[in-house]
Each structure stands twice: as C-alpha cells, then as structure tokens.
Image: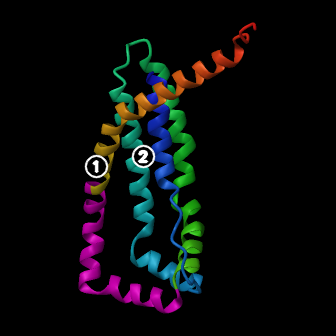
C-alpha cells in the first residue's frame, strides 16, 4: 500500500508538470523570447520547481509513517528519484523547450507586449510576488491532491477486485450441460 501511494503521488507530480501548452499562432523570434525569459527570471522559476519537487517528495515519504527498518531503503530511493528528476528540470535543459513553446505560441508582437508589461511597474510587482503566489497555489493544490488519495485508493482497490473477478470467471470451467 505504501508503494502505491508513493507511486501515485510521484505520477501525479510528474504528470502535472507535463501539461501541454495551448496552441497559438506563434512566430516570435528566439532572441525576443530569450529576452522575455531573462526579464521574467524564468531560470529562478526552474529552481523553484526543483525545490517544490524535493519538498513534495520529502512530504510524501514523511506521510508514509515508515518503520525504522524501512526508512533507510525509502531514503535511498528518494535520493535516487531526486538525482534522476532534478537534472532533467535544470534551466539548461528546460530553456530550449521554453523558448520553443513561447516561439510556437506567441507572435513577435505579443512577446514584445509581454516584455513591456514585465518591465513596467505593475509587471515588476507581479514578478516579485509571483513566487509567493505560486507557493500558495501549489500548497492549495497539494492539499486537494492529498484529499484525493483515499478516493484514488478506493478506485484502485475496486478496479483490482473487478479485474480479479473477471479473470477468475474466465479461468473457471464452463458449466457442463
């Protein structure tokens, strides 16, 4: 049961990161997009994401209420998860994907307007408050996901029971006529 909870949380964490961007008209230049990403401190966002993933994994391990014998094993695999996931989420790896997403989604004019906004007083205020805002929304989302775990476990249990019943029914000899 502990393994399935840990796996489910990891899967939810990873799949929530892979949401597809909305399609747009595109056409912005990579150079302009890179300027926007620099102004918006997108590299810091990547670092924050890494920190959130580490924190989320640590919280999930803590919630497993492991016995003393299990803790070193889970810690070992938690470290392995971190060393597997975090390098893939470094800014060096994410930047080309981000540039591609922005150039595919926004026009040159739209990126220019975003640059104007983020260099304005309001835009700078937003950039300063965005990490706190992001943390607040992430915390709220994680709380909702934690509340889903019992429901997801129930669905998983019922699915497993129904699949086992179906397999037993197929394996049972047909009644003699």
Q: Which mark is residue 53?
A: 2
Residue in the image at 29% along x and 81% along y: 123
Vertical arrangement, residue 97 with respect to residue 172, above or below: below
Residue that extends furthest to the bottom in the rendered view of this protein: 109
Q: How many marks?
A: 2
CA–CA distance in space, label 2 to label 1: 12 Å
Q: Is residue 126 magenta?
A: yes
Residue in the image at 44% along x and 23% along y: 2
Quarter-of-image position of residue 62: top left
Residue in the image at 53% along x and 76% along y: 102
Tell me which segment is drawn in magenta.
107-136
**Front in this rendered view, residue 131 or 164:** 164
Instruction: Tell me the crowding category of disc 2: few under 14, some 14 to 19, or many 20 or more residues within 10 angstroms, Cα based.
Output: some
**Front in this rendered view, residue 37 or 143:** 143
Q: Is residue 3 magenta?
A: no
Residue 24 position in % (x across, y down):
54, 80
Residue 172 position in % (x across, y down):
69, 11
Q: Which residue is mark 1?
A: 139
Circle 2 — which element? helix
Q: Main secondary structure of the magenta part?
A: helix
Quadrant location, the N terminus? top left
């Amino acid at each position: 049961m502990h393994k399935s909870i840990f796996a489910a949380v990891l899967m939810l964490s990873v799949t929530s990161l892979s949401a597809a961007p909305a399609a747009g008209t595109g056409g912005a230049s990579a150079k302009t997009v890179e300027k926007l990403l620099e102004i918006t401190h997108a590299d810091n966002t990547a670092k924050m994401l890494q920190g959130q993933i580490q924190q989320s994994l640590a919280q999930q391990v803590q919630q497993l209420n492991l016995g003393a014998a299990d803790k070193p094993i889970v810690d070992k695999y938690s470290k392995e998860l971190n060393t597997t996931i975090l390098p893939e989420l470094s800014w060096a790896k994410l930047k080309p994907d981000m540039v591609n997403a922005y150039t595919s989604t926004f026009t040159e004019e739209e990126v220019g307007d975003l640059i104007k906004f983020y260099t304005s007083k309001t835009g700078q205020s937003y950039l300063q408050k965005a990490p706190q805002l992001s943390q607040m929304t992430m915390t709220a989302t994680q709380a909702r996901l934690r509340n889903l775990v019992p429901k997801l476990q129930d669905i998983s249990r019922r699915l497993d029971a129904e699949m086992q019943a179906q397999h037993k029914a197929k394996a049972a000899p047909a009644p003699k006529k």
